[in-house]
Image (cartoon, grey):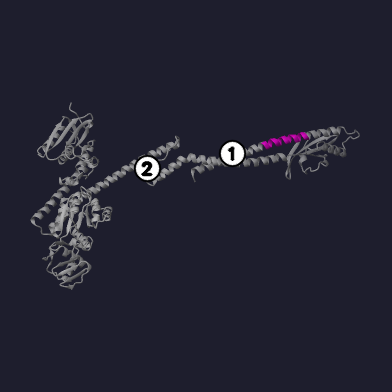
Amino acid sequence: MKFSYKILICTIMIMAAAFGFSGYYFVNYIFETSLEREVSQAMDDSSVLQFAFETAALNIPSKYDILPDSIAEQIGFSLENSGKGNGRLLRLSDEEKRVLYVSDGFAETADFLDKTSEETRIYQVLPQGERYYIQTGTKFYALGRVLYLETMRDVTEVFKERAMGFSVYRKVTVVVLLVSSLVMLFLSRWLTEPIRRLKDAAKKMASGDYRVRAVCSSTDEMGELTKDFNRMAEALENTIQNLKEEVQAREEFIAAFSHELKTPLTSMVGYADMLRSRKLEEEKQFLAANYIYTESRRLEKMSFRLLDMIVAKQQGAARRKTEVSVFFEHLREMFGNDDSVELRISYEAAEVCADTELLTTVLINLTDNAVKASKPGGVIELNGRREEEGYRFLVKDYGEGIPAEECKKITEAFYMVDKSRSRSKNGAGLGLALCSTFLELHGTCLEIESCPGKGSCFSFLLPKEVLNEEK
Amino acid sequence: MRIKILIVDDEKPICDLMEMNLQAAGYDCKAVQDGLEAIRLIEQEKFDLILLDIMLPGADGYDIMEYIRPLKIPVIFVTAKHEVKDRVKGLKLGAEDYLVKPFDVVELMARVEVVLRRFKKTATVLTAGDVTVDLESRKVTKAGVPVELTNKEYGLLVLFMQNKNIALFKENLYEQVWEDEYLANSRTVEIHVQRLRKKVGWEKCLVAVYKVGYRLECED
């Protein structure tokens, strides 16, 4: 059952109970006060009649010592006549409770008079068919006789009013309940609207749409909840996005890896098969053997590089204080004899805290890339300079450059901007991936600025905490 | 007229491998390592078959395929992309076949043969000595007399005749004819070759190569 309906039903139940109880109490209260009034009127009537009877009894001729029955009947008759029109009935009985006078329609009641005494005037409410009466009874003495006077007063109106009150009240209650349920229905829907929106959003998310957000329209707890939900959705979306990207990167890596693995394998298997199954001319035989050799070396190189990456990731960088000159002199030794490019090295002296081996590999890779990108006779600049945040190494060439959209992907494993060229220069597409892995271990990353046709500048900043400047 | 085949692969060693084997089988070959260069060549010359890699510099294999399609030149993709979705994509683009690297040379030759035959660009009758095989009607005759062969024997015979003077390894034979993985020490191939020898009278020219397989020796 919907929450809004629950609210609705609870409210209606409480309202119905409250209306019912208060209505009953109210109608009954009015009824009881009017009945009380009627009772006291009836009592008054009774005492007035008693007084009138006693007065009449005093005025009878003195020849009677004791009030005779006929006179009592006469007085009763005259008393009744005097009060005709107000619906009062009376009955007069003697000491043995024999009736001396009775009005028409007076009810037969047994034992009522037993409870009366001289001092007390009693009454009872008496239903007679559809009508109600208040019956009073009293005992008095008149001229040496004990007499009982009973009256009946019609109070049907009071009961009718009560019944009417109840029925009117029921109708009003029903109407009020209907109207208020309608109002409550809309109200509860409005109140539970944020819950419904949250529910819909959660449902959509469960079915895989992580971009949905619930609309937040209030500042109460519901609004807070919606906000928190949206925050959660945001976090979830980001996490899933990251996971997806990671999975995709891994898939791409595996695809690239299998491609890089299969390509040399194809040659190796093919040429080996040729060598064993056919007699070849010496020249072709050499070619085949040479291809098997070079492709094996390529595979070897790739596996070593991958191994380097894995090992470095697991072992981390073993940092030692090293003069930056060590790196630059090493590079000068390695590439200085290369006549195809002109090497320009300039650096500010400093001491950095780094894993010499890893950093050297990074610099050699970057320089090697620069050499490959340069035209014969091109210039390669190797710079080192102190900066506020640390020490920056720059490797700059004036070669082919890299298109902007390729710059991002260039550090991915097996990514090659120009595949055929890269292969012909014996690359596996792992150099920059290796560099960025090693630099990550030093808490920095590779920055690439490049312009196709004008050259590229690869740089990285060793942060201060791994740098210890000379004083 | 010799059949001309264009090889497009960014790896020089693989180009050379395919070229050497196809040339040995009597095809004319041209090899290029760049997609745009391949398109330029297709515009200039008429080829009977193109062996196409997918990951290429210049223009990738799918783009080249789109370009080739209206020319109605049969194409076999030869690529390291082994996933089903890549194969389906390649075949849907209109390639005749899809060969995944690393491949066996024997398989490459067989597939080239099949595609060329489908396009009726190659002889449908093979001969070796006095034995002739009509690949279309699957009829084998020796000196004009029909020879009854089982399916496997027929498969072996065709392989030997397509690869004259080349040693065929037992595992290759098994994989090509039985289309299943070869189990070491299986004597299935030997038994079938024995029967084939008897049926077509090749006791002398179908020689066993020590330990590894068989070679059909005949002079053309």
Image quadrant where one finds the C terminus of chain A:
top left
Q: Nearer the viewer, residue B33 or B110?
A: B33
Give SS at disc 1.
helix
x%, y% of residue A428? 18, 45
Q: Which residues are magenta?
A: A30-45
Classify residue A128 as left or right of residue A229.
right
Q: Which image quadrant is residue A97 in? A: top right
Looking at the rendered image, the disc whose residue lies closer to the viewer, 2 or 1, is 2
Left-right relation of A22 to A400: right
Taking A298 as reference, is B127 above or below it? below
| Residue topped by disc 1 | A18
The disc, 2 or 1, on the residue closer to the chain's N-terminal end is 1
Foreground residue among B140 and B102? B140
**Can residue A32 be found in the magenta stretch?**
yes
Residue A211, numbered circle? 2
State whether residue A314 appears in this view.
Answer: no
Which amino acid type is shown beneath numbered disc 1?
A: Ala
| Label 2–label 1 contact, CB within 8 A | no
